[in-house]
Image: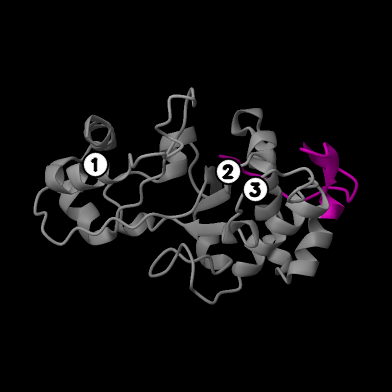
Amino acid sequence: TGSGTSSNMSADEVIAHLPPSRAECTVEKIAINAVMAGAQPESLELLIAMVAAIADPDFELYGINTTTAPVYPAFVVNGPIRDELDIPYSYGCFGGVATRANAIGRAMRLIMRNVAGQVAGVTSQTTFGSPGRLASILAGEWEEKSPWSPLAERRAGMSGNAVSVFGTMGTMNVLDTTSQSACDFLEMIGKSVPYVAANCYTPAMPFAEMMVAINPICAEIVGREMPNIEDVQECLWRY
């Protein structure tokens, strides 16, 4: 999770060195790629924060950019900036909504290729790739509908505008039209995600994370019975 500001920054200020090229990613380079993607000028501050987030050593961007897997960064935004930049957080937030914010995802992909140097078959060994390597997922959290505190606040103690980044291999839909209780919903989700050959569950992986998004109707039911998010996480882990 990161935050950034474009105020009082010079064009040649280095935000990060992005692997695999380890090239300097300056404010100017971010702005150039944003213009090529068609992103609005107001998005520069968010893009700088996004670059800073993926450059955190704990994110392991080198592995994400060079692996054989179809993995790519996905971003979740908190705070008023969701509305200011037209970042979707309702229907179709993970893809399929025509919004100005789509250009921000495209800008990040251009930065990956033009600055970080991610080229399939050369620096990236991704076997099949993914549509997410053309335009990153950029979605907001529907904080107003959530029974729990915002993601950035839970993860990093950050309130207001913030962005969190995950390495993802796409989306998985869990259909549940029969559950009525929190435990039933979480059992269905928990037993659906550990499918055979999932990277999160192979013994070769020392650690991995999976982001679970619960729609507002189900979240309200789960939240009534489990107001503490830690109980939700523990229940999912158990299943």
For the point 68% across and 61% down, the residue is 43
On the image, numbered disc 3 is attached to which residue?
Answer: 50
| Residue 7 numbered mark, or none | none
User: What kind of residue is marked 1?
Assistant: Lys
Q: What element carries label 3?
A: helix
Work out whether mark 1 precedes mark 3 in sequence or the reverse, and give the earlier one.
3
- In the image, is 54 to the left or to the right of 151? right
Residue 32 x %, y %: 84, 61
Residue 18 x %, y %: 77, 40
Which quadrant does the C terminus fall into?
Answer: top left
Q: What element carries label 1?
A: helix
CB-based contact (under 8 Å), mark 2 and mark 1:
no
Q: In which quarter of the image is residue 45?
A: bottom right
Residue, far right: 12
Q: What element carries label 2?
A: loop
For the point 30% across and 53% down, the residue is 214
On the image, numbered disc 1 is attached to which residue?
Answer: 191
User: What kind of residue is marked 3?
Assistant: Met
| Residue 69 numbered mark, or none | 2
User: What kind of residue is marked 2?
Assistant: Ala
- In the image, is 142 to the left or to the right of 232? right
Mark pair 3, 2: CA separation: 22 Å
Q: Find the magenta span and give its range.
A: 1-29
Residue 199 x %, y %: 46, 37
Residue 153 x %, y %: 44, 39
Mark pair 2, 1: CA separation: 23 Å
